Amino acid sequence: MAGIKAHGLQLVGNSVIKNLNVEMLPEDPSALGSGRIWGNSDAGTLNFSTTDGDGDVVVHSLGTKAEIDAIAALVNTINGNTETEGSFRHEVARIVGAAPETLDTLAEIAAALNNDENLHDTLVNLVNQSIQDLDQKVLGTATEAMDTLGEVQEAVGLEALETTSQTLRGAINEILQLAGEGTGQLKQSINDQRYSFASATPAAEHTITHNLNSEMLQPMVWVQDPDTGKLKNDIVSIEYVDLDTLKVELGEAANVRVTVQNLAEIA
């Protein structure tokens, strides 16, 4: 006689079917009706039967042992160490590269820049403060005969001093210009590699075509509460269909807002 095992089957909303009887058979039964569940020990599959629109019995398989093993192998690869090609740790290590430990995360870089949206003005103020500090240091070590601008001009010659001053101003202006251009280019680079999506109709599955052509993506998903209309950042199932497309799967139909950032181009 075939062995019988008792199981609990969990459904959506944490409801369960308790004491589900699953027959363990060496092969599929020849006489079948709708609603039968059995395990094929030779094939390593879990099967169940239904009827189609014509009343014929149809057999469905929940997957073979080989398919389950293949999924397990893929999960092991993704969870591999920094030396495992294809693992998330390997990709993170590639992005971090040779960055110092104190600057190897986006949060640390933002903190180092003081989370400052007005980075250009901050750099200007730092340069001005540095010049003031330099003046204090110079005056602090100057002799009494050389602690005024007139005395220095007389000692080195007004023309030479003015030339040096102009050269210094030109160098400082060039630094400030480059800093401003760099800040704008960085912001533009980040924006160019970001895609935003807002659904128009509630659905349990949303397909987003972002065209970022990258494996290194950081999606953020906000789900709209159907009762209050408020958005909340939630943990949902995300499938990476290809380099330009991902699919968001929800437990129930809802509108979503999604942003996708390409981290590869920023790195």
Image: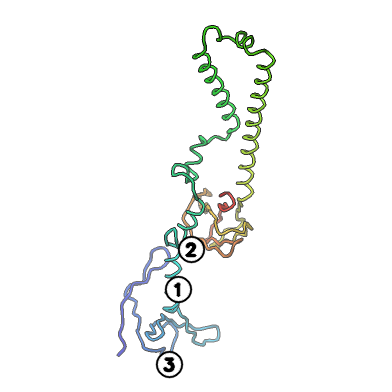
What kind of element bears circle 1?
A: helix
| Separation of marks 2 and 1 at Cα, in angstroms | 17 Å
Q: Residue at x 60, y 50 (%)?
A: 194
| Separation of marks 1 and 3 at Cα, in angstroms | 30 Å
Q: Earlier in the sequence, mark 2 or mark 3?
A: 3
Q: Residue at x 58, y 23 (%)?
A: 128
Q: Quadrant of residue 31?
A: bottom left
Q: Nearer the viewer, residue 176 or 166?
A: 166
Q: What amino acid is found at the position of numbered circle 3 in the picture?
A: Ser
Residue with the mark numbered 1 = 70
Please indicate whether residue 149 sits to the left or right of residue 60 in the image. right
Q: Which numbered marker is on residue 30? A: 3
| Residue 53 visible at all | yes
Q: Earlier in the sequence, mark 1 or mark 3?
A: 3
As displayed, is residue 104 above or below residue 246?
A: above
Q: Quadrant of residue 254?
A: bottom right
Please indicate whether residue 38 sits to the left or right of residue 167 in the image. left
Please indicate whether residue 267 sits to the left or right of residue 157 in the image. left
Please indicate whether residue 8 sits to the left or right of residue 50 in the image. left
> Can you say which quadrant of the picture contains the N terminus?
bottom left
Q: Earlier in the sequence, mark 2 or mark 1?
A: 1
Q: What amino acid is found at the position of numbered circle 2 in the picture?
A: Glu
Q: Position of residue 70 (x, y in %)?
A: 45, 73
Q: Position of residue 167 (x, y in %)?
A: 67, 24
Q: What amino acid is found at the position of numbered circle 1 in the picture?
A: Ala
Q: Which numbered marker is on residue 85? A: 2
Q: Quadrant of residue 151?
A: top right
| Separation of marks 2 and 3 at Cα, in angstroms | 46 Å
Q: Position of residue 223 (x, y in %)?
A: 52, 53
